[in-house]
Image: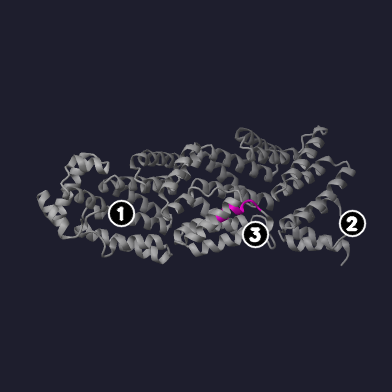
Amino acid sequence: MTLAGELERARPEFEAGDWSTALRRWMDIDPAELRPDDLGRLGVAAYLGGHDQTALDALHHAFAAELDNANVPAAVRCAFWMAMIATMAGDPVVGQGWTARANRLLADHDADVVERGYIEIVRMYAHIDAARWPQAFDCARAVAETGHRHHDPDLVAVGIASQGRLTLEGGRVPEGLALFDEAMTRVAAGEVSAVFAGQVYCTMIEGCQRVLDVGRAATWTAALTRWCDRQPGLVPFTGQCAVHRGQMCTLSGAFRDAIAEFDAALARYLDTSASAAGLAFAERGEVYRILGDLDNAELSFSQAGAHGYDPQPALARLWLARGRAQAAAGAAQRLLLESTEPVLRARILPGAVEILLATGAVAQSRPLAAELAEIGDRFGCVALQAKAAFASGTVELADDDPAGALPYLRKARQQWMELHCPYEAARCQAAIGRGLLALSDSDSARAELAAAGRIFDALGARPDAEAVADLLGPDAHPAGLSDREVEVLRLVATGRSNGQVAETLTLSEKTVSRHLSNIFAKLDVNTRTAATAYAYEHGLM
């Protein structure tokens, strides 16, 4: 086929998203025979096909050709692409060099060209990397404004989505999510080119994951998957897509599928030396922890750390599962002191409450659960509200108020069920069973616990299944006594007064009196002497 024929085929293939076919055609042609715009397309196609060095070489040729033609805006566009590709490939120094060169060209060019908006994208990412949030937001706004002014849908979508992400990270979650929705309308309408559509998808999905907006994350993850599948040979964004699918599999209880997705992401990330591998390792570690494979969980968390990703507080929960309660509590305390931003607090607080309750720090856990509830209401994300209700319910259980715990736990279970998250719903159901046991409603308790156990068994969540089996098994306390009631009964049986029991267990005398009243009712006795006799007769001493 003639050169002209190859080019006539390659250009529409590129526009249709068939990157690999277009790339093969262009690479069969001597670069010296390609026009600068075709070299630019070749560079983008090579990047989308995962051939970064080929992309940089083609764009460099295009850059030189555009300068020879005195086409400064087109040369700046090539410099932008080289800066972005080098930075995303883990070579920020080269990226900064091309950005500086683009800035120098623009400084000598008075016209208000659209390329100024593209260089603002690079500046924005530099500010984000340095945690200069106000400057990053100003850049995002400038990107969108330049896009509107020049009718460039790529800049508009990236600018609006980036403003949404930065607004969300600042704690104004409903406002940030509204900006996400606005950006998504442009992507869904097909107005945005491939590279920028992928960036917008990932920006929004990662943001929704951060604030536990499960509904949006699920919808957009499915859309991103379809978008990737429609583009043969696409390499960028497919790793992120696998991570997002793995996260959604985790929420839906498909734990083995989740591990497969994280493994697929890691295969792609490790091939390209992407730092995002740390997140995939951490997410995989959390799934292994839920499944009870603590060795693989620990290995995954270690690999996450080696790739620059802090796997806390998930790692602290692993330490708790390994019996290292004080180490877990120490990590939780440190995270609480270090974390001040509401989005980060929202991710840390559920694990911190769980860990602190396991170490007996009920008084410290209560305000943390209340803070989580306040953040959940402010953000308006149902999954976060469910986590807050579960935290409040478990605090009440630990503080010996099962009646106060049950409304929270039932609310949390209902919310998780509406979100189709069976593992989290079963955790709530198991906690409801514990509350019913403490209230002497043994038959209802056993029904709830058995139902939760069946779900844990089906999902492969072995530690949770074993914990429920222990509550249902022959080792359960007689007469439906709770663990705390057995503790109180044992101390009463040794002759301690209510005040002494309260001091030993760090409870109020009123709480001890309530426990003793419940114990008498469960044992069908009226005196401390009769309760003591029961304790000895049934091997509780």
**2 and 1 marks in contact (CB < 8 Å):** no
Decide whether residue 447 is among the magenta residues.
Answer: no
The residue lying furthest to the front in this view is 494
Q: Magenta segment, which residues?
A: 274-281
What amino acid type is highlighted by mark number 2? Glu
Q: Viewer-proximal residue, 206 or 329?
A: 329
Q: Residues within 10 Å of mark 1 (few under 14, many from 20)?
A: many
The residue beneath circle 1 is: 432
Q: In percent of the image, x 28 and y 64: which residue is there?
A: 473
Q: In the rendered structure, which disc, 3 or 2, sits on the residue that comes first in sequence?
A: 2
Decide whether residue 276 is among the magenta residues.
Answer: yes
Q: In the rendered structure, which disc, 3 or 1, sits on the residue that comes first in sequence?
A: 3
- Name the quadrant of the N terminus: bottom right
Residue 178 seen in the current view: yes
Between tags 2 and 1, which lies in front? Answer: 1
> In what element is the residue under mark 2?
helix
Q: In percent of the image, x 49 and y 56: which residue is there?
A: 286
Q: For the residues marked 2 and 1, what is the alpha-carbon distance in whole angstroms?
A: 73 Å
Between tags 3 and 2, which lies in front? Answer: 3
Examine the image and state in which quarter residue 48 appears: bottom right
What amino acid type is highlighted by mark number 1? Ile
> In what element is the residue under mark 3?
helix
The residue beneath circle 2 is: 33
Q: For the residues marked 3 and 1, what is the alpha-carbon distance in whole angstroms?
A: 42 Å
Q: For the residues marked 3 and 2, what is the alpha-carbon distance in whole angstroms?
A: 33 Å
Image coordinates for residue 69, horizontal then vertical, percent: 89, 44
Question: In the picture shown, does residue 333 fall above or below 199?
Answer: above
Residue 389 seen in the current view: no
The residue beneath circle 3 is: 268
Q: Residues within 10 Å of mark 3 (few under 14, many from 20)?
A: many
Q: Residues within 10 Å of mark 2 (few under 14, many from 20)?
A: few
Judged left or right of residue 186, residue 57 is: right
